Amino acid sequence: MGQMSENLLVEMHLTALRNSMNDSWATCEALRNRKLRRLLSSAVTLSFWQKKIPEDLLRIKNPIALLPLLSVTTKAELRLTNMAARTQSSATATHGILTGTSGSTGEPLQFFIDRRLAVRQCALLGRVAELDTFSPASLVHLWPTANPNPLFDHTFFCVATPEFLASQKHEIYTSLSRPGVVLHALPSLLRILLELANHDGIVLRPMRIVTSSEVLVPELSLLLSKAFQCPIASYYGSRELSVMAGRCRVGRFHENSEDVIFEVVSENGTPLKKGETGRLVMTGLNSFISPFIRYYAGDHGFFYPDTCPCGNPLPSFGFEGRTHETVAILLPNGEHIFPHRLTGIFNRRFDKILQYQIDHYGPYAFRILLIPSALYSHLDEQEIVREFTEITHGSVDVRRVSSIKSYGSKVLPYIKSWS
């Protein structure tokens, strides 16, 4: 797809998304029901979903009303299912991109995403950033790992450590000096970038900054907005369903209702009332290649019962028990390590490790708890120790366990247990 045609398509989607916010909720709900019927009809051709979706649900006009009758789908459930049983294999050769989760729950999952959704996701990112026009070519990404979202295939800098960010600073400064740049980064990386630019006497003025993956606390948002002199946006997303909700100036997250259905449910999957906190499950209305229906990724939240003061009419929700803000691991020798570098060791072995947790219990001492699958071997363990030691330069104790303690609503893959 040429740049001109991609820009035009993004503009068309962005215009449609802006206009839809002026439509009545009944109009939006009719669209959601149409998209859900298509999704369910497609998903039921896969053996995994045939067992979960009753035929009656495919025939009714308003399937959203009966969506709570389906059981909640968990990451563990999908991990135990052969990928062919949950994937439209006929579409993967032409449109599929094999990817996986970041491992933020300690339970990495692999699946296919649809490359045709790249335009749509760019448009959703543009709406989150409150842009009137948006060219995907203006995106610059700073991330601590290799590109986590293949749908955002633009200028990308992998900065695994603050030192590595510094080694690429001239290229980063040059990219951010272009007019109309939209910078997409983790909040923790933005703070490091700001400190580096201040030290070098460099002034960076992107048009917008969009953050994700970590909690953007109000104090840091204000600091970054003043320092970079541009609005700071934030979205809630996942590798499974990409951009799902945007945070408004009031601090609420607004569902991208045209593309995803959020529900707040109890532990047994029963819908909860607005204001009540429970498991946050989502249905991706465009996830045809690898369907995600009533999918629980690990977050807890609640829907606000009132209309948001910001004026956005889309349903708004908040989080309770979100994952911790990622902070670089500081070793006694002054070296910084982002936890993402360590989690990658385990994510590459998604079929051999059911769950893991890294316990940093001493300055150079790490304990790895893991629940192995039947494919896990002594050789895997040796390789994990070697790769882990090369990064941390510390002692590594691997322990195979049958369960791992949960901290908050997710099993955090990295914890520090010493002070």
Image (cartoon, helix red, strand yellow):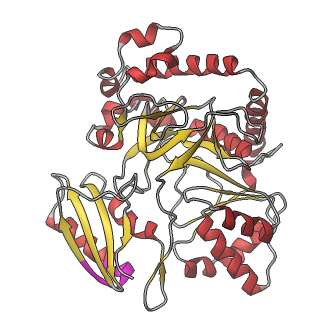
As for residue 394 lying within the magenta part, the answer is: yes
As for residue 412 lying within the magenta part, the answer is: no
User: Residue 149: x and y, percent?
Assistant: 54, 51
* Picture residue at 66% right of the left edge, 34% below the top: 306
The answer to whether residue 30 is visible is yes
Q: Quadrant of residue 140?
A: bottom right
Q: Which quadrant, please, contains the C terminus? A: bottom left
Q: Is residue 166 above or below residue 69?
A: below
Count how many numbered circles sit on residues in the image.
0
Residue that protrudes farthest toward the bottom in the picture: 333
Q: Is residue 313 above or below residue 360?
A: above
The answer to whether residue 1 is visible is no
User: Residue 319: x and y, percent?
Assistant: 53, 48
Q: Nearer the viewer, residue 389 or 130?
A: 130
In the image, 28: left or right of 336? Answer: right
Q: Quadrant of residue 290?
A: top left
User: Residue 354: x and y, percent?
Assistant: 26, 52
Q: Nearer the viewer, residue 163 or 397?
A: 397
* Picture residue at 38% right of the left edge, 67% below the top: 414
In the image, 284: left or right of 70? Answer: right
In the image, 189: left or right of 15? Answer: left
Q: Nearer the viewer, residue 413 or 352?
A: 413
Q: What residue range appears in magenta? A: 389-396
* Picture residue at 40% right of the left edge, 51% below the top: 409
Q: Which quadrant, please, contains the N terminus? A: top right
* Picture residue at 83% right of the left edge, 43% below the top: 132
